[in-house]
Image: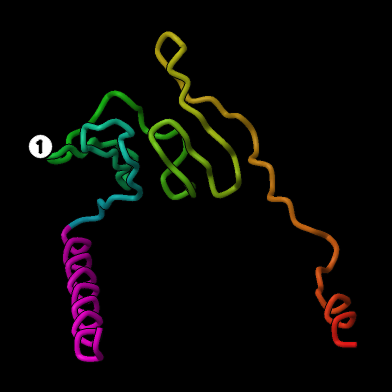
Amino acid sequence: MNAKGFFYICAGILLLVIAATVRSQAVNAQGNDFIAAVSPDGSSSMSAFALRSDGEVMRIGYGNGAVPTDAYPNPPVPVSEISYWNPSLVITTSGALWGWDAGWPDGQWRNFGQVPPPVVSTTAQSWSTMKRSYKK
């Protein structure tokens, strides 16, 4: 790829970013509702689930747009407290793990407790001792 082609690709990407930014600002000016999260359907139906800012779960399907769904209820916590979402799993910003349990007669959200923190090494890692042994 020559420099001219690379320039045109970068310019095109920049224009797409600018257009998306301007469009999102125009959409936000029209109302306070926005899509807070999107999750794939998991089936081959070419659809996805979207979580709106008001907590409503929508199904976005190929050819039929976004429609409300009763398959999954609204999340158990406010949308502002969600750090990860898919229709059957929610992790809050405080680390609480919620799962949708459809096995109950009417289905319900269950709190599974805190997500364990990541494992972090408490000893400093350094390659300096190895470097010294090979510098001799």
- Residue 118 is left or right of residue 49, and the answer is right
Query: Please, which residue is most extreme toward the top here?
Result: 105
Query: Please, which residue is most extreme toward the bottom here?
Result: 3
Screen quadrant of the N terminus: bottom left
SS of the residue under disc 1: loop
Name the main secondary structure of what is drawn in magenta.
helix
Q: Residue at x 22, y 37 (%)?
A: 47
Give the residues drawn in magenta, as a range: 1-30
Quarter of the image for residue 114 reads top right
Quarter of the image for residue 88 reads top left
Q: Residue at x 20, y 85 (%)?
A: 5
Near-viewer residue (56 or 7): 7
Q: What's the amino acid at mark 1?
A: Asn
Write down the residue under mark 1.
Answer: 64
Q: Determine if the magenta segment contains residue 17.
A: yes
Image spot of residue 37 (x, y percent):
35, 48
Q: Is residue 66 above or below residue 22?
A: above
Near-viewer residue (135 or 61): 135
- Residue 114 is left or right of residue 121, and the answer is left
Q: Residue at x 47, y 20 (%)?
A: 101
Image spot of residue 49 (x, y percent):
29, 38
- Residue 103 is left or right of residue 95, and the answer is left
